[in-house]
Amino acid sequence: MSEDNRVNSNDVWIVGVGLTPVGEHWEKSLREIALEAIAAALAEAPGLSPQALYVANTLAPALSGQSQLGSLLADFAGLRGVEAMTIEAAGASGGAALRQAYLALKAGAFDVALVVGLEKVTDQAGPALQAALATATDADYEAVQGITPTAQAALIMRRYLHESGAPADALAGFSLVAHANAVGNPYAMFRRAIKPEDYSRAGMVSEPVNMYDAAPVADGAAALILARSSALPPAGPLPAVRVAGSSLAIAAVALHDRRDPLVLEAANHSANQAYRQAGVTADDIDVFELHDPFSIYAALSLEAAGFASRGQGWRLAQDGEITRQGRIPVTTLGGSKARGDTGGATGVYQVAEVTLQLQGRAGPSQVEGARIGMAQCLGGSGGTAATHILVRVDPA
Amino acid sequence: MENARHWRLRRQRYALVGEVCPHCEEKIFPPRDICPECGEEARDLFEFSGRGQVYSFTKVSDAPTGYEESAPYAIALVQLDEGPMVTAQLTDINDEQLRVGMPVEMVTRKLRSDGERGMLVYGYKFRSAVPAQAA
């Protein structure tokens, strides 16, 4: 603790991660998937008892008829007596829940907190699933027109290609890199590399969004154990991972209410706040787990976080800069595209994945020498953005 | 049933009634009583002309509940002449006509239907403001 250079008593650390494979889990219920992730995370932090549970979820009320996931999961996980609740911010729920845990620990309310992100989507399909996904839009002015998240991504992508003059396959690289990185991830849904011609021949989902621009919506849960310095276990074989920046920002929920629909304003503010807190710049980031439910959001996220100027993010996918050997590796374990899109659980998967990268536990997907990592998740078309920056702290 | 919910929005849905800010003249749709531009109170009603142009468009084939019978349908972000942008379906337009920048005008159409006994929701859609070439 104090003797092993792990600094300030008010610091917040990630001391356990628990991942479950993303996929179509017909045999597992909402709670079973979550409990599996919780058990895996607790196993990494023996001796630590969480005092609070923050659940990230957005679709359980619509798709499973279930609210109060906080008490449901705490009860079934044998954690009666803890404080527990659900944090909802659509696709940014995971980052938002982590932020609540971080704030509670920073405030000294608890020493150890548990965050679990989960979605169970495969019990519904077709129109009911589309309607549930569309709840992330402005119900009175977007969803009423029959819009879906896929169609919103298509509206943004068409305008982006129109304004930037980028070629039709400008975003292919995001999908290619995500798939290549997922091959070595045992928790990924699609552990299969794809070729440029697979992308160019893919059928349209909602033009110009093709099958490889769209991430598969699937079941999954991931969990994190966070601790204050006072509860940090003695240094073990793994480097410690500190939460150096935590930020959540908002923009208009409705795409049409944004000053510039091609700019992720919330993502920009959130990233800048996190950089400031962590005392780093975009140049210092070794791994960036951005949110790619559709490939256009990967380009816009790179622009929002300062890796490219407006309308130029697609070029990073063409120039190999986003691969694990490139300037700014993204979706290093597959991202939403190939790991699978777990809705409100995404932010928790991302932070767990950044932790694995910083601790050298990412296996074949390892980014060599990763020391500072960033995770950012988006709610809907960018109405919410939560950003976390993690830093590896080696024992003295 | 959501009758009251849709009834409350009748002015916006049937006549594109928004607001104009008495402080900075910003035209506001949908109405929100607080000007997004200057932050002052803005409650003066303003009826939009219904004319605008397509900022972007796509087609929905995997439709949500209540929209299945219209699928596939074209949907767009429409920049109104007075400034604000709206999300709306396009109607009475051939796929070949669709392009970014095309002038459009508002019409009232059926948006949503919930089965034989369910409610029908009507509201704005947009059609080409340039008459189609005689076939």
Image: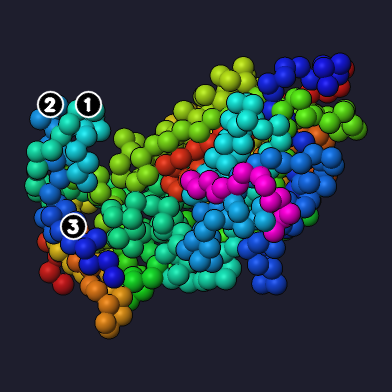
**To which chain does the residue with label 3 belong?**
B
Q: Which mark is residue B23?
A: 2
Label 2, label 3: how many angstroms apart (C-alpha)?
27 Å
Q: Position of residue A156 (x, y in %)?
A: 40, 47
Question: Which residue type carries mark 3?
Answer: Arg
Q: Which mark is residue A300?
A: none
Residue A165 visible in the displayed image: no
* Residue highlighted by disc 1: B38
First along the sequence among labels 2 and 1: 2
Label 1, label 3: how many angstroms apart (C-alpha)?
27 Å
* Residue highlighted by disc 3: B8
First along the sequence among labels 1 and 3: 3
Residue B119 visible in the displayed image: yes
User: In percent of the image, x 31 and y 35: which residue is there?
Assistant: A259
> Mark 3 and mark 2 in contact (Cβ < 8 Å)?
no
Point out the frontmost of discs 1 and 3: 3
**Dot 1 alpha-carbon crowd within 10 angstroms: few under 14, some 14 to 19, many 20 or more:** few
User: In percent of the image, x 77 and y 36: which residue is there?
Assistant: A15
Question: Which residue type carries mark 1?
Answer: Cys
Q: Which residues are magenta?
A: A76-89
> Mark 1 and mark 2 in contact (Cβ < 8 Å)?
yes
Element carrying mark 1: loop
- In the displayed structure, would residue A267 be above or below residue A256? above
Residue A77 part of the magenta-drawn span = yes
**Dot 2 alpha-carbon crowd within 10 angstroms: few under 14, some 14 to 19, many 20 or more:** few
**To which chain does the residue with label 2 belong?**
B
**Dot 3 alpha-carbon crowd within 10 angstroms: few under 14, some 14 to 19, many 20 or more:** few
* Outermost residue to the front: A81
Question: Which residue type carries mark 2?
Answer: His
